[in-house]
Image (cartoon, helix red, strand yellow):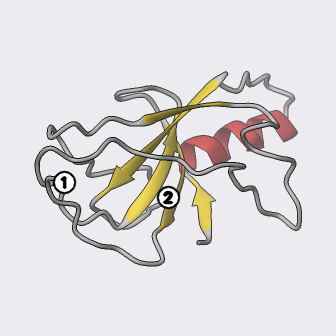
Amino acid sequence: MPGYFTDFANNKILDLFFGATPYTAPTTLYIGLSNASANKFGIVSEPSGGGYVRVAVSNNLTSFPAAATGTKSNASVITFNQPTADWGTPQSVFVADALTGGNVLAMADLTVSRALTAG
C-alpha cells in the first residue's frame, strides 16, 4: 500500500536537508487507524472507544528494516486490540509520534477496507 509523508514530516526533512536543522526521530512510533482517507495534512478520524488504542512499535531497524527502492516496511505484523464496540470502516493507517494526539508522520490508504465491529 503506497503512502506518503505528511506535511509535518516533509517540513522536518526539508529543514534537515536545507539548513541542517536537527530532528530527533521518536524512539517509539504509534500506528493508528483512520476512518478517513490518507492525506498530506495528517488529519485522521480515529475510532473512539471500544478498546481502540494506537499500537506502540519501537522505532529501530529491527522493527523497520532499512529502506529499499524508496520504500519502508514493518518487519512483523502489527496487531490492534479486538474491538469491544464498532470502530467503523478504517480507510487508512498512519504513523504518529505519540500515543494520543501528537504529530502524524505518514499515512497510507488500506488496499482493502472493512468494517471493524465488536467481537
User: Could you say where residue 20 lies in the image, as x and y percent from the top left?
Assistant: 86, 28
User: Could you say where residue 47 lies in the image, as x and y percent from the top left?
Assistant: 22, 48
The residue closer to the viewer here, 41 or 98, is 98
Compared with 68, 80 (above or below) is above
- Given the image, on which type of amino acid does mark 1 rest? Trp
Residue picked out by circle 2: 40
User: Could you say where residue 106 lies in the image, as x and y percent from the top left?
Assistant: 56, 50
**Few, some or many C-alpha atoms within 10 Å of disc 2 (few <14, some 14-19, many ≥20)?**
some
Q: Residue at x 64, y 24 (%)?
A: 26
Horizontal arrangement in the rendering, residue 104 relative to residue 34 (left or right): right
Quarter location, residue 72: bottom right
Q: Residue at x 73, y 21 (%)?
A: 24
- Given the image, on which type of amino acid does mark 2 rest? Lys
Quarter location, residue 1: bottom right
- Can residue 108 be seen from the camera position used here? yes
Q: CA distance from mark 1 to mark 2?
A: 23 Å
**Few, some or many C-alpha atoms within 10 Å of disc 1 (few <14, some 14-19, many ≥20)?**
many
User: Could you say where residue 101 lies in the image, as x and y percent from the top left?
Assistant: 35, 29
Image mark count = 2
Q: Secondary structure at mark 2?
A: loop
Residue picked out by circle 1: 87
